[in-house]
Image (tube, helix red, strand yellow):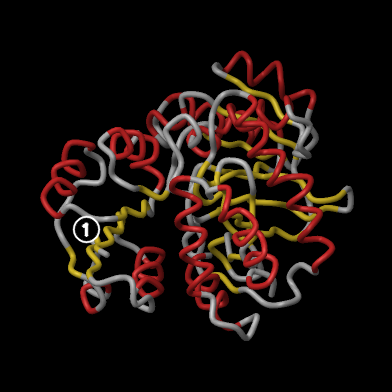
């Protein structure tokens, strides 16, 4: 089997490393890849900002499976275009990826489906920001609506600072088009948790949870980054909490998307805050996280003390086409047996 991995970072290197462990994989391409990945896969040039470039590459190398790493190709509709051509692809469609590509869509979706999240206001203008701010107490979270490479979030210590940051985003000076709409949010206190599941469009199965280091400075200080390292252990969440997160967050998200006419297949990354009021959703990513993938994939093979290569292929197949009636029982059994840490 030839596999094409789209992307060029540590996440993609971890995916390539994991794929190399399977005897089913005979060739791995990574586009565009990087110098480190070149030791484990053939790196090929591509412009991940261009659908035409990625389609041309796939036409050339004819992969049996494509795994999408970063978020931009999902926003561009890469999975839609590849699927339309009959090419097997792991990842959600453009419509499903709105959970990540639009913070306002995600917040309204969470509210519609009564999934726990922070109080918020969506603002398209400075006037709306001024009208919304009296409903918040500092600190106030200001988020750009669009994709900003993990850097579109600011925590303002005062209402004046929140107004200034929001206006900078809305003007386009800070983040360009990504800030053309902003979301003001209640500040939540607690421990952040990255909780990833795989979905076949109906069912969900959890991976091991992880935590990453967001702030740029020591002692959790300074502005947010896209993540500066991550770790996972057996004790981040216990079995009871894992099952609660599946039942009250991950499964309702997939069911809610299906109820709205959008099938969610692939990885669903739930960025959570574990607050005294209970777990609450901060954000969604619609692909493997970076840097969370780097500790999660090795943990799949080590935390449970069992090899997980067969189940890894089960979730890849499920995330592409959904399990067949015959496979559903086996898939669920493997997940119960192998995915718990």
Write the residue at 41% across / 45% down: 71
Whether residue 144 can be seen here: yes
Q: What is the crowding at mark 1: few (fewer than 14 residues within 10 Å), some, or many (at least 20)?
A: some
Looking at the picture, tell me which residue is in the foreground, 138 or 74. 74
Residue positioned most to the front:
326
Residue positioned most to the bottom:
305
Q: Quadrant of residue 81?
A: top left
Asked if 72 appears above or below 336 in the picture, the reply is above
Residue positioned most to the left:
60
- Residue 42 is left or right of residue 139, and the answer is left
Looking at the picture, tell me which residue is in the foreground, 223 or 56. 56
Residue positioned most to the right:
276
Q: Quadrant of residue 133?
A: top right
Looking at the picture, tell me which residue is in the foreground, 304 or 141. 304
Residue 317 x %, y %: 45, 55
Residue 207 x %, y %: 61, 63
Circle count? 1
Quarter holding the N terminus?
A: bottom left
Whether residue 210 can be seen here: no
- Residue 65 is left or right of residue 120, and the answer is left
Quarter holding the C terminus?
A: bottom right
Write the residue at 48% across / 37% down: 97
Residue 112 x %, y %: 73, 25
Write the residue at 54% across / 39% down: 264
Element on which disc 1 rests: strand
Asked if 92 appears above or below 168 in the picture, the reply is below
Q: Give the residue pinned by disc 1.
A: 32
Asked if 297 appears above or below 242 in the picture, the reply is below
């Amino acid at each position: 089997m030839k596999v094409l991995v789209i992307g060029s970072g540590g996440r993609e290197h971890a995916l390539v490393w994991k794929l190399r462990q399977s005897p089913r994989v005979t060739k791995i391409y990574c586009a565009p890849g990087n110098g480190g990945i070149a030791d484990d896969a053939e790196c090929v040039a591509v412009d991940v900002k261009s659908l035409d470039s990625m389609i041309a590459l796939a036409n050339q190398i004819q992969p049996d499976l494509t795994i999408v790493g970063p978020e931009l190709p999902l926003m561009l509709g890469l999975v839609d275009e590849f699927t339309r051509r009959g090419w097997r692809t792991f990842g959600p469609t453009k419509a499903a990826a709105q959970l990540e590509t639009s913070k306002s869509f995600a917040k309204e979706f969470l509210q519609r489906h009564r999934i726990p999240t922070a109080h918020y206001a969506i603002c398209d203008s400075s006037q709306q920001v001024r009208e919304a701010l009296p409903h918040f107490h500092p600190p106030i979270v200001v988020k750009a609506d669009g994709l900003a490479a993990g850097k579109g979030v600011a925590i303002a210590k005062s209402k004046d600072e929140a107004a200034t940051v929001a206006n900078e985003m809305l003007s386009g000076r800070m983040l360009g088009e990504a800030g053309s709409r902003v979301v003001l949010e209640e500040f939540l206190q607690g421990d952040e948790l990255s909780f990833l599941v795989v979905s076949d469009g109906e069912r969900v199965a959890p991976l091991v949870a992880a935590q990453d280091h967001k702030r740029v400075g020591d002692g959790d200080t300074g502005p947010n980054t896209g993540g500066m390292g991550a770790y996972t252990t057996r004790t981040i969440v216990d079995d009871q909490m894992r099952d609660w997160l599946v039942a009250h967050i991950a499964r309702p998200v997939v069911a809610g998307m299906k109820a709205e006419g959008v099938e969610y297949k692939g990885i669903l990354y739930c960025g959570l805050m574990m607050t005294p009021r209970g777990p609450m959703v901060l954000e969604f990513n619609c692909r493997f996280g970076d840097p969370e993938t780097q500790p999660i994939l090795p943990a799949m093979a080590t935390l449970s003390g069992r090899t997980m290569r067969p189940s890894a292929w089960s979730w890849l197949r499920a995330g592409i086409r959904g399990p067949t009636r015959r496979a559903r029982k086996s898939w669920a059994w493997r997940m119960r047996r192998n995915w718990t840490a």
